[in-house]
Image (cartoon, helix red, strand yellow):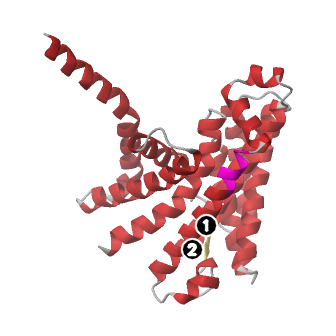
Amino acid sequence: MTIYLNAMSQGVLWGIMGIGLYITFRILRFADLTSEASFTMGVSVAVSLITQGVSPILATVAAIFGGMLTGYVTGLLMTLFDIPSLLAGIITLTGFYSINLRIMGKPNVSLRRLATIYDEGIATLFQSTLVQRTVIGLMIVMIVVLLLSFFFRTDLGQAMIATGDNEIMAKSLGIKTASMKRFALVLANGIIGLAGALVAQDNSFGDISMGTGTVVVALSSIVIGEVLLKQLTMPLRLLAIVLGSVIYRVILVFVLQLGFNANDFRLISAIVLAIFLAFPTISISVRQAISTKGGA
């Protein structure tokens, strides 16, 4: 049972990354590969500062700014040099691998016996490490959801949504779409950098390869949440992503508990994502087949 509770706790943290990717995937309408670089940036900044004695809270805040920087670079490549979003993400991802490695100093940094954000503030009221991590994770999720929900109701937030919905129309309304894209990428990757810092502190180590494959994890969270819960308001939509992340982690643990090799983790992740992506199409086909038979 403990392994499932751990999976749910980690699902909350990975859900924060899903919320970050949602901004580019659903609002700007492209899957931003920069997220793998910004996640690792969050990891590297947080662990390097914590090992140097910096407060875990300050280290986590610095990780957010590190993620923002990563997103800004991709935004410049896209808007200033007209590089396609996919290629811009790949360029940033490739370049920041070396930058993140320089920040960490080595490929793997341990946080064992060092204080993390889960040892600060309200978390100290709980004796269980699992409860500490879950409470802090849920608190941060609620803060992120509330701030984003408020932001998307502002004129700036609506301008960002309009840019993603119809860029030509947005330009005709006087919206600076290039600036909106850059700002969206900065915002999204700042949140993803936060997720990287939280996951690294939860795992008690940082690794240069921690960002690899994280796009699949985040997309799975978004898709699962959308398949299970539809027609929601913005706050509930963001919370559905976190729920999708929790379900995704539980499914993976369940499959691995069946005896599958741990080396197949990424393969299983991809299969789970493919199933949920295909689910709407499959369900429509099944309903059409049933209605056709009923009509006959």
Q: Are marks 2 and 1 in contact (CB under 8 Å)?
A: yes
The percent position of residue 174, horizontal first and vertical second, equals 86, 26
- Tell me if mark 1 has few (under 14), some (14-19) or many (20+) residues whose alpha carbon lies within 10 angstroms of its own: some
Q: Is residue 175 above or below residue 201?
A: above
Please say whether residue 47 is one of the residues in the magenta stretch: no
Where is mark 2, residue-wise? Answer: 136
- Can residue 212 be seen here? The reply is no
Is 204 rendered above or below residue 27?
A: below
Q: Nearer the viewer, residue 90 or 282?
A: 282
Q: Position of residue 137 (x, y in %)?
A: 55, 69
- Examine the structure image and report whether residue 149 is included in the region drawn in magenta: yes
Query: Is residue 114 in view from this perspective?
Result: yes
Tag 1 residue: 140
- On screen, residue 236 versus residue 158, left or right, reads left
Task: Name the one closer to the observer, 156 or 18.
Answer: 156
Nearer to me, 214 or 10: 10
Q: Quick one: quadrant of the C terminus?
A: top left
Few, some or many residues within 10 Å of mark 2 (<14, 14–19, 20+): many
Q: Secondary structure at mark 1?
A: helix
Q: For residue 156, which quarter of the picture?
A: top right
Measure the C-alpha gap from mark 2 to mark 1: 6 Å
Q: Main secondary structure of the magenta part?
A: helix
The image quadrant that residue 272 belongs to is top left
Left or right: 38, with 180 as reference point: left
Residue at 52% of width from left, 56% of height from top? 15
Amino acid type at image mark 2: Ile
The residue at 42%/50% (across/down) is 266
Q: Which region shows up in magenta?
A: 147-153
